[in-house]
Image: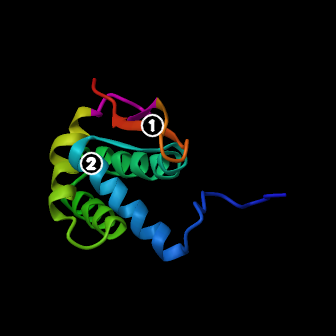
Amino acid sequence: MRHQVKGYRLNRSMGHRTSMRKTMIKQLFEHEKIQTTLAKAKSIQPDAEKLITLARNAQKGDDILKMNARRQVAASLGNNSNEIVKKLFDDIAPRFTTRKGGYTRLLKLGPRLGDNAEMVLLELVSE
């Protein structure tokens, strides 16, 4: 039984999973869509939506709340993420001010030729 066990292990070590998650979320925010396997997309989708919600809620706050939110996002995305954080707060989050959730969508593309893994397109919803 999997009581109180959440997340996807993806046959990787914890460090590899963490770095892969950060990289894929950065790529999602940079390109606004990525093509990946279904399991990887389902593993990063909640984290990406939480970061968008954090950025969206910081739009309404004062300067201290905005700075703290930027620092939280930068800490969760890791080093060299300044451009991504700036794009998230200045470009992506204002698009979703009226939306309560569901900022990303999964579009199934079919199986991959090499290993028959289910491929999906994870993209940001356009209003």
Image quadrant in which the N terminus is located = bottom right
Q: Which residues are magenta?
A: 96-108
Instruction: Say which residue appears at 32% left-offset and 28% top-offset.
Output: 98
Between residue 106 and residue 36, name the one nearer to us.
36
Q: Is residue 8 above or below residue 56?
A: below
Give the farthest residue toward the right: 1
Q: Position of residue 58 (x, y in %)?
A: 28, 50
Give the farthest residue toward the front: 114
Report how far apart the C-alphas of labels 1 and 2 lie in the structure.
Answer: 16 Å
* Within-10-Å neighbours for mark 1: few <14, some 14–19, many 20+: many
Task: Give the amino acid at mark 1.
Answer: Val
* Within-10-Å neighbours for mark 2: few <14, some 14–19, many 20+: many
Position of residue 76 in the picture relative to residue 42 (left or right): left
**Residue at label 1?**
120
Q: Is residue 67 above or below residue 110?
A: below
Image quadrant in which the C terminus is located = top left
Q: Secondary structure at mark 2?
A: helix
Picture quadrant where residue 70 is located? bottom left
**Residue at label 2?**
29
Q: Secondary structure at mark 1?
A: strand
Between residue 114 and residue 99, name the one nearer to us.
114
Instruction: Say which residue appears at 16% left-offset and 55% top-offset.
Output: 86
Q: Earlier in the sequence, mark 1 or mark 2?
A: 2
Residue 13 in the magenta stretch? The answer is: no
Task: Give the amino acid at mark 2.
Answer: Phe
Q: Position of residue 76 (x, y in %)?
A: 36, 66
Q: Nearer the viewer, mark 1 or mark 2?
A: 1
